[in-house]
Amino acid sequence: MNPVQILSLLLAISVALNIGCAAGLIATQSGVSRAGSVLAGGSAAASALALYLTGVSAYH
């Protein structure tokens, strides 16, 4: 992997983590239990990362 690909992957992971944390905080503020908010945040982060990786694989 070249440095641009590595930095791009790190950026995607960072964005997915931010989306997951935001989704978890929103779920917590909505009154969902702690376990439910962790699941919501994790699924949001996984979905964001999957969309990014799907786009990258379709590009190549």
Image (cartoon, rainbow, N blue to C red):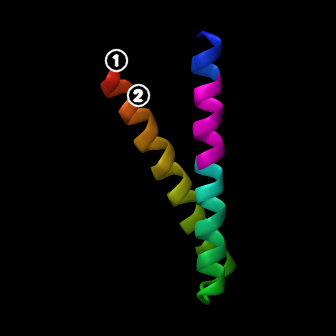
Tell me how far mark 2 sits from mark 1, CA to CA: 7 Å
Q: Is residue 12 magenta?
A: yes
* Picture residue at 65% right of the left edge, 32% below the top: 10
Direction from residue 45 to residue 34 in the image, left or right: right
Residue highlighted by disc 2: 56
Instruction: State the extent of the magenta-drawn residues as a range.
Output: 7-15
Q: Are marks 2 and 1 in contact (CB under 8 Å)?
A: yes
SS class, disc 2 = helix
Mark sitting on residue 60: 1
Direction from residue 8 to residue 47 in the image, left or right: left
Percent of width and height locating residue 4: 60, 17
Toward which corner of the image does residue 20 lie, by quadrant? bottom right
Percent of width and height locating residue 1: 59, 10
Q: Amino acid at mark 2?
A: Val
Image quarter where the C terminus lies is top left
Mark 2 Cα within 10 Å, few/some/many (few <14, many 20+)? few
Percent of width and height locating residue 23: 58, 68
Q: Amino acid at mark 1?
A: His
* Picture residue at 59% right of the left edge, 78% below the top: 27
